[in-house]
DNA sequence: CTGAAAGCGCTAACAA
DNA sequence: TTGTTAGCGCTTTCAG
């Protein structure tokens, strides 16, 4: 390995001078700079990150932890329940592009519902200056502990008092707008709900909104619901349950906690000969890329996932620069995306900003 | 920051002993271990990665560089030309799960066709023990230089003599099988090709295979082609060109260099009232998730992207462990995925392993 | 404008 | 079984 000393020796200067040249500082005579630069080039010197980090007390790396929700046997190609994080990660990468920051990401696997295994947290936290934590860890005491040592920003986590910052989409208002559309614009009355993991803050908010809207429309109600884990397969299973229990008195709309389950529902319903949206409307949440390709194209709520990543990252960097900042919650607005699975005419593609219902 | 010394002082032992306890080594009396462990817990000590890396001369981090192919204005939601890397990254994460390794990934932006900007390479390389390089960098002299300093594995790069290892899908055989299917099984004769970026090794191989098969079928030929950049939008543009130039004597099949462009073609053709596959068959490459949701479902070639990531990662770790290994090329087999956009009956979903045509 | 030298936090060889 | 100590590569203060 070529070190600073090798360069210094070759250029017949001290390591301090080499360091100055490497960092483009002034206060180096031009002739010296040239000599050093030449030595660097000839030797192919690249500064060692470990040495730099140790000396600077700064790693210039941020970490990101994602929770991979999978249960045994469901890890098939369809269970792409991470598409979400892919988008978020783009936002983060976008934010740190052309900066000195680098991203270290880990996908952890949830061992069943409930608390995720956070044992991998420490190795990560020793190598970064701050951490972006994906939805699913928020309630964990380990996160709280972590946040005491390191800047932490929770993405899409539990809202409310936290030791860490939170950046989340306004799930409640988005879901409320969607359900309102189903009821007010399409006259749907008998709803069925396909829920998400019980420990997902996002899923909880969406469900709360459903109930909230329903309370405001006396003629309407939930005729049933089924749990899911955010995967296509779990959506299919939910639809099969629905079919088994509610035929022939089917619901006239199935509200799903995310797009992938909605796609699963769409698939199962279509396979069973049920017309969508003729007999039953189906809606998702997230507006993942596959949503627009579904048959029929999926009506859903667009979560600004990329922006989520960008904002969370920006906040984290602020936090690292100023550790004194008071933790804050940032809610990003969503968009109602009308396609045709809700009953809107084929070809419909409308995006409507959703206003925040109740500031929380 | 809590250091080893703080723990040592509190437990009244030396730093060496603390280190031993942290690493679960034997040769520590049980009573001592307990005392140290307690100090660690009370203080909330987590080893600093920089210190460890410096001392161990090993960072326990691997890097991954991806090339984001985008041109100004095409950075819309549809241009998800990275779906590919998302899958590869899953494979890598899968491979290092439960190991001490962590992944540091960077998305670089290609500044126009041709050489990518590799200036971000050095900061990365100083922080990792080895690098996974995404397709698009392979020919860069910077990579060759990099490979002299560090273990490097190129994913889907140029085949042939390299300073670095290469793990790639067998694009040639896959594309050949696909085109053969179109010609031999569906009697298509007048093909149109939608190509990829001129500097993409994958796109080049696929194109070579098309020509190769065509040479073996005298009655068939290429009636035209259009360039693309692997994005949905560029596929749509290609289809519009096709329509403008070749109507009414349309080709009977459009072979696209990847799925996203095929989806764009599908969309443009359908919008123009052309029946797919009735009048024109359309095929893709990659078997991305959206492919199966397209209308009609896309016939394509499945690239084992996840496996690509896994193998590349495994090889990199081997390389790190044994720097002496001779660089090798690893070609992974593809699968022909028959759905209905090629002319196979609706509902068809067949996956056929593709045999390696000519070992290269 | 340049150099000497003191760490940064941790590991591991060697001693005790 | 435990402690001492010499680095690992780099930055930065303080002198010169």
Image: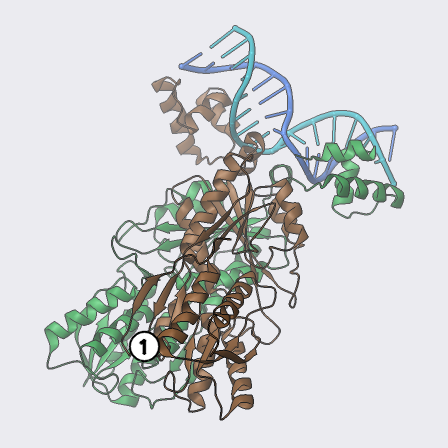
Chain colours: A green, B brown, C cyan, D blue
Quarter-wise, where is residue A48 in the image?
A: top right
Q: Nearer the viewer, residue B214 or A14?
A: B214
Q: Residue at the spot x=44%, y=39% of the render?
A: B100
Q: Residue at the spot x=39%, y=49% of the render?
A: B94
- Which residue reaches farthest bottom? B248
- Tell me the subunit letter for badge 1: B
Q: Residue at the spot x=53%, y=33% of the render?
A: B52
Residue B274: % across, % down: 42, 89
Read off the residue under disc 1: B344
In the shown orientation, is residue B289 left or right of residue B249?
left
Residue A264: % across, % down: 27, 70
Q: Nearer the viewer, residue A234 or A303?
A: A234
Placement of the N terminus of chain A among the 4 image quadrants: top right
Q: Nearer the viewer, residue B77 or B14?
A: B77
Residue A103: % across, % down: 53, 52
Q: Residue at the spot x=38%, y=28% of the render?
A: B38
Residue B32: % across, % down: 38, 19
Q: Is residue A229 above or below residue A222?
A: above
Placement of the C terminus of chain A among the 4 image quadrants: bottom left
User: Can residue A154 be seen?
Assistant: no
In the shown orientation, is residue A222 left or right of residue B341?
left
How packed mark 1 is, by other alpha carbons closer than 10 Å (few <14, some 14-19, many 20 or more), is: some
Quarter-wise, where is residue C14 in the image?
A: top right
């Amino acid at each position: 390995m070529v070190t600073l000393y090798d360069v210094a020796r070759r250029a017949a200067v001290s390591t301090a001078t080499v360091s100055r040249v490497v960092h483009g500082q002034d206060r180096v005579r031009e002739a010296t700079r040239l000599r050093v630069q030449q030595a660097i080039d000839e030797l192919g010197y690249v500064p060692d990150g470990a040495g730099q980090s140790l000396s600077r007390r700064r790693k210039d790396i941020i970490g990101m932890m994602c929770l991979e929700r999978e249960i045994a046997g469901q890890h098939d190609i369809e269970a792409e329940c991470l598409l979400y994080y892919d988008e978020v990660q783009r936002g983060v990468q976008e934010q740190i592009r052309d900066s000195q920051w680098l991203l270290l990401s880990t996908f952890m696997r949830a061992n069943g519902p409930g608390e995720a295994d956070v044992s991998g947290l420490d190795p990560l936290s020793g190598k970064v200056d701050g951490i972006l934590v994906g939805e699913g860890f928020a309630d964990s005491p380990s996160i709280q502990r972590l946040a005491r040592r390191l800047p932490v920003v929770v993405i899409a986590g539990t809202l409310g008092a936290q030791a860490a910052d939170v950046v989340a989409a306004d799930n409640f208002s988005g879901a409320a707008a969607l359900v309102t559309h189903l009821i007010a614009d399409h006259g749907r009355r008998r709803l069925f709900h396909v829920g998400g993991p019980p420990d997902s803050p996002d899923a909880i908010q969406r469900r709360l909104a459903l109930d909230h809207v329903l309370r405001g429309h006396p003629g309407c109600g939930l005729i049933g619901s089924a749990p899911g884990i955010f995967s296509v397969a779990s959506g299919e299973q939910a639809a099969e349950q629905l079919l088994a229990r509610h035929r022939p008195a089917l619901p006239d709309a199935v509200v799903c906690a995310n797009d992938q389950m909605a796609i699963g529902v769409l698939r199962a319903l279509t396979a069973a000969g049920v017309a969508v949206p003729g007999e039953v409307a189906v809606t998702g949440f997230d507006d993942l890329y596959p949503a627009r390709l579904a048959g029929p194209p999926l009506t859903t709520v667009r979560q600004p996932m990329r922006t989520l990543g960008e904002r969370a990252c920006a906040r984290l960097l602020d936090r690292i620069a100023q550790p004194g900042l008071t933790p804050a919650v940032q809610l990003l607005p969503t968009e109602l995306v009308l396609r045709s699975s809700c009953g809107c005419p084929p070809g419909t593609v409308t995006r409507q900003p959703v206003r925040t219902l109740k500031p929380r």
